[in-house]
Amino acid sequence: MASRSDNLPHRFARIYTAAITDVMDGLGLPRQTLPWAIRPLTADMRLAGYAFTARGRPYRGTARDRDATLRLFLKMLGAVPAGSVLVLAASDNVAAHFGELSAAWFRSRRVRGAVIDGSTRDAASIARLRFPTFVRYRTPQDSVGRWRVRDWGQPVTIGGVRVALGDVVVGDWDGVVVVPRRVAHEVLVRCEKLVGTENRVRAAVRRGMTPLDAYEKFGSF
C-alpha cells in the first residue's frame, strides 16, 4: 500500500465523485462505481482513503464457534491501518457487519471510513459519531452466529467492480467510486483541473451565459 505520508486521500477528499467518474470515463475506466444501493448513513458523510479489503460469508456455527468467530472479526478490525477505508464484501443479506463500537475504534485509529456491501446496526449512534459509513442495508441482527469474516487484504469484487488493497476509495452522497492505485495520481491531477474548469463554468452560468455558450467557451458542462 502507499505511504501514509502522502496527501493523496486529503486531495481526493476535496473532489466530488461525479468529477472522478467523468475523468475515469475519459481514461477508459467506465465501471468503477459501486452499486447504487451502497449509500451513506447521512447526506453529509464523505470519505476518501486507501482501500483495506475484507470478505465474509454467512455462517451457522455451534455455540462454541461464536467466540472464535467474534475474535476473528475483531482481529480484522484491528488490522485496518490509519488512512484507510474498510471495504467489506459481506456476501450476506441478513446480519449487521458493522456497529457503533467498530466505528468508535476506527475513529480513534484515524481510519477514514467504512464501505460495507452489507449492513450496519447502531446507525443513529454512528451518525452522531459522524464516522463516514456507507452500507447497503440496516438491521439490528448481530453477525455473530450468522456470518463470519473469511479473510482480508485480498482483492474483492462488489457489483462487478474490483477493489484491491491500496486502491483509492472516495464516497459522498452520490455514491462510492474506486480509483485503481496505478492511475490514482493521474486521475487526481485531471480531477483538480476539471473542478477548476467547472468552477469557471458555474460562475459564467450564474452571470447569465447559456449552457451551450458555456460549453463552447470552456469545453465542459
Image: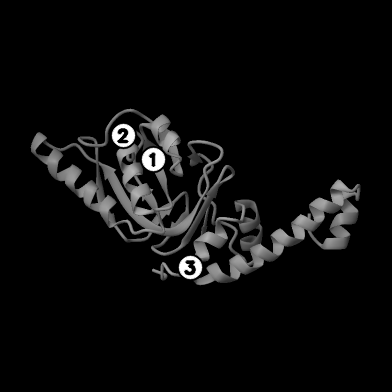
| Quadrant of the drawing holding the N terminus | bottom left
On residue 181, the disc is 3
As helix, strand or loop, the secondary structure at mark 3 comes to helix
Residue at mark 1: 118
Residue 125 in the image: state x and y as whole percent: 39, 32
Pick whichever, 107 or 91, lies toward us: 107
Q: Amino acid at mark 3?
A: Arg
- Is 144 displayed left or right of 49 in the figure? left
Q: Residue furthest top?
A: 140
- Label 1 and label 3: CA atoms lie apart by 24 Å
- Label 2 and label 1: CA atoms lie apart by 8 Å
Residue for point 61% across, 58% down? 20
- Is 209 displayed left or right of 135 in the figure? right
Q: Amino acid at mark 1?
A: Gly
As helix, strand or loop, the secondary structure at mark 1 comes to strand
Residue at mark 2: 95
Residue for point 36% across, 31% down? 122
Residue for point 17% across, 46% down? 71
| Quadrant of the drawing holding the C terminus | bottom right
Residue 12 in the image: state x and y as whole percent: 56, 59
